[in-house]
Image: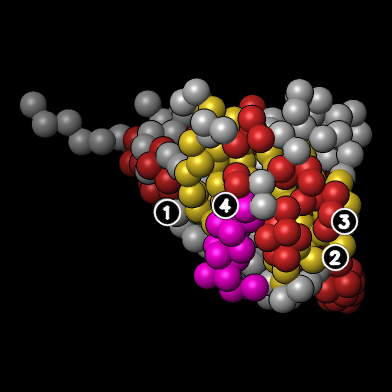
């Protein structure tokens, strides 16, 4: 006997289809606001649960509903995360994500994605961050952003303008992806051979090295400043490079290096560079952030699979 699908089943299948269609965008918004792939995934899952329970027959625009819900939830999480990060040991860096499958991470443009820019975004309030991300990465119109953030149009324009000014004061003009890759490869090669002179030639005078380890042994707990100090730090522990298996990865739209020891991923490294040279080295030692990066490679495959509560 042939059984017709019930209206409820059809409705749920439609809800899944709509959600999967927009999931990359939702993750992209949450990740840029939070700087954490794990927290962004948690937000996206919570948005799915809300979407599942919503009376979808009264939703005029699913993408507007989903984007608004994601943004507001990400802002709430960011506000509580700021308190948690006050107890973090040493520098905090955003979680890198693998962007080999989706270079823009769900956005119209690959804006606000480089690790160094995400780090600067942390200096903005969560609402400022969200307004900037929606405008610059996802090309939302100001009235749409005002509705999402439940602010006046005038206020939203001021917030985005203020965020742009803050970021332009903090950021330098980045080199292109090919030059970024060349500088990173040259840095690793010189560090491996202990060539301090070559290292110094690659670095900007005011270069800073940041190590995110949350207290893990081997990670510097304070920023290391200046060309000579950073070059010396990179070559001070020859054993760090001996026997290391260094693999190039695509992280946040740029080249990064994953350093394996005894077959296990131990450290992630990337840089920020301008025409003056490398001005920021970012080392991630925190095992949970390394694991999150490796997991992010499979995020797109998972996004097309079943969702909790649909079986």
Prevalent SS, magenta region: helix
Any part of residue 227 in sight: yes
User: Residue 189 shows which numbered tag?
Assistant: 4
Q: Label 2 vs label 4: CA separation? A: 20 Å
Q: Label 3 vs label 4: CA separation? A: 20 Å
**Rendered image quadrant of residue 286:** top right
Specify the quadrant that holds the C terminus.
top left
Q: Nearer the viewer, mark 4 or mark 1?
A: 4
N-term mark: 4 or 1 = 1
Instruction: Label 1: state its secondary structure.
Output: loop
In the rendered structure, does residue 33 fall within the stretch colored magenta?
A: no
Nearest the viewer among 121 and 277 is 277
Q: Residues within 10 Å of mark 4 (few under 14, many from 20)?
A: some
Nearest the viewer among 254 and 275 is 275
Q: What residue sits right under mark 3 in the picture?
A: 226
User: Residue at the location (42% across, 53% down)?
Assistant: 101
Specify the quadrant that holds the N terminus.
top left
N-term mark: 1 or 3 = 1
Instruction: Label 3: state its secondary structure.
Output: loop
Is 280 located above or below residue 258 in the figure? below
Q: What residue sits right under mark 1 in the picture?
A: 101
**Location of residue 67 in the rendering, given as x and y in whole percent from the top left corner:** 62, 55
Q: Residues within 10 Å of mark 2 (few under 14, many from 20)?
A: some
């Amino acid at each position: 006997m042939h059984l017709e699908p019930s209206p409820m089943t059809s409705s749920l299948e439609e809800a899944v289809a709509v959600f999967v269609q927009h999931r990359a965008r939702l993750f992209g918004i949450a990740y840029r606001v939070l700087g954490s792939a794990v927290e962004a995934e948690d937000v996206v899952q919570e948005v799915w649960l809300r979407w599942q329970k919503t009376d979808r027959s009264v939703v005029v625009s699913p993408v507007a509903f989903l984007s608004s819900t994601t943004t507001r939830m990400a802002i709430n999480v960011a506000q509580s995360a700021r308190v948690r990060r006050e107890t973090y040991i040493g520098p905090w860096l955003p979680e890198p994500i693998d962007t080999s499958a989706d270079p823009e991470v769900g956005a119209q443009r690959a804006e606000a994605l480089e690790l160094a820019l995400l780090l600067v975004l942390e200096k903005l309030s969560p609402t400022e961050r969200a307004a900037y991300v929606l405008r610059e990465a996802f090309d939302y119109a100001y009235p749409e952003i005002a509705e999402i953030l439940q602010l006046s149009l005038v206020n939203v324009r001021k917030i985005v303008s203020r965020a742009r000014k803050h970021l332009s004061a903090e950021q330098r003009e980045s080199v292109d992806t090919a030059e970024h890759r060349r500088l990173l490869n040259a840095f690793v090669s010189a560090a491996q051979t202990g060539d301090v002179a070559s290292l110094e030639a690659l670095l900007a005078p005011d270069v800073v090295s940041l190590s995110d380890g949350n207290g893990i042994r081997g990670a510097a707990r304070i920023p290391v400043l200046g060309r000579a100090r950073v070059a010396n730090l990179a070559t001070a522990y020859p054993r760090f490079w001996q026997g290391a298996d260094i693999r190039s990865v695509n992280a946040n739209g740029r080249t990064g290096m994953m350093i394996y020891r005894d077959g296990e991923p131990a450290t992630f490294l990337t840089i920020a560079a301008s025409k003056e040279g490398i001005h920021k080295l970012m080392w991630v030692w925190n095992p949970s952030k390394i694991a999150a990066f490796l997991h992010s490679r499979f995020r797109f495959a998972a996004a097309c699979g079943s969702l909790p509560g649909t079986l």
